[in-house]
Structure formats: structure tokens, C-alpha cells
Image (spheres, grey):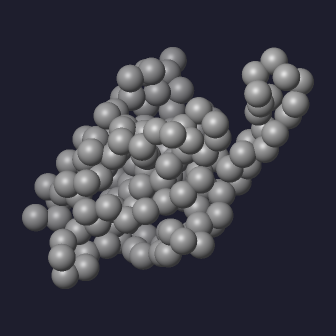
Amino acid sequence: MPKTSAGILIYRRPPAGAEVLLVHPGGPFYARRDAGVWSIPKGEYEPGEEALAAAVREFEEETGFRPNGPFLELMPVQQKGGKVVRAWASEGDCDPAVLRSNLFTLEWPPRSGQLREFPEVDRGAWFPLAEARRRILAGQLPLVEELERLLR
């Protein structure tokens, strides 16, 4: 059975056009990567756990912000590695400059025996939909495209 994640795609509608909040993964593997690695704030959840509650929890853990809803369920997507992502869209606003993320521990450098902590998300940003399509992971692109259709 594939792993499942749940997340929230927050959007806002300034006069110049709709924007979405995406987050950049933290840690050394993504430090120099940009296009194609951004994501919606999301995380894995366990069977039996309510997916929307997990999505709200993961959004808050990865950004420090609490989405308020209402939440509109989007079609699930399957990422390249097989993980299924369930997502909800919600209109909202926040300041990515004050984003704060939970941490994870990783042996770094590899085989050094040194454990270091890194933020799960090292930054977030608002992107117009056209730019979001370029920045987001390919497997999550359908989420942005569905939101764009819904906002027309």
C-alpha cells in the first residue's frame, strides 16, 4: 500500500492575480535546488487518522501558521515515488518571512557520525500560478492546475 500524505494549498487573490504558498524543503540535499522541488505544506499520516486533520497539523508544523478554512478537497495525486497526496485548498494569507518549521535529525556529513538538526522547510514564498507551476514538484502540479480551474 503506498504511503499517504495530506496537505493544504493556501491561496490568495491580490489584484495582480491568484498566488499560492509553496515551501522549500530544508536540509542539505535541497540547499542548492530550486525549480521543481517546492511543495505544498504536507506530511504523512497514519491509516485511521482523519486526513484533513492531518493536513492542518502538518501545515502548522511546517510553517508555524494555522489555516482557518473553509477547506475544499482537491483530487488526490500520486507522486513519482508512489506516495499519494491528498490536499485541500483554502483561501488565506500569511507572511513567509516569519515562517518557522519543525526540525528533523540527519547524520551530516554522511558517515561522519555527526547528527545535525535541519528545518523540514527552510523557506516559503507566494508564487503567481504560472511561477508555481514551474517551481512545484511535478507530482503536485495537478493540485495547482485544479485550483486554477476552480478559481476561474
Tell whether 148 sits left or right of 55.
left
Q: Residue furthest right?
A: 113
Nearer to the camera, 13 or 132: 132
Q: Residue furthest bottom?
A: 15
Residue at horizontal 27 percent and vertical 45 percent from the top: 134
In the rendered image, which quarter is residue 112 located in? top right
Residue at horizontal 38 percent and vertical 23 percent from the top: 80
State whether residue 75 appears in this view. Answer: no
Residue 39 locus on image (x, y percent): 43, 46
Residue 83 locus on image (x, y percent): 46, 27
State whether residue 102 appears in this view. Answer: yes
Nearer to the camera, 34 or 44: 34
Tell whether 109 sits left or right of 124.
right
Count of numbered marks: 0
Residue at horizontal 77 percent and vertical 30 percent from the top: 108
Residue 99 drawn above or below residue 81: below
In the rendered image, which quarter is residue 57 located in? bottom right
Nearer to the camera, 125 or 114: 114
Residue at horizontal 40 percent and vertical 74 percent from the top: 92
Residue 60 locus on image (x, y percent): 60, 62
Q: Residue furthest left?
A: 152
- Pick the quarter of the image with the C terminus: bottom left
In the rendered image, which quarter is residue 136 located in? top left
Tell whether 121 sits left or right of 86.
right
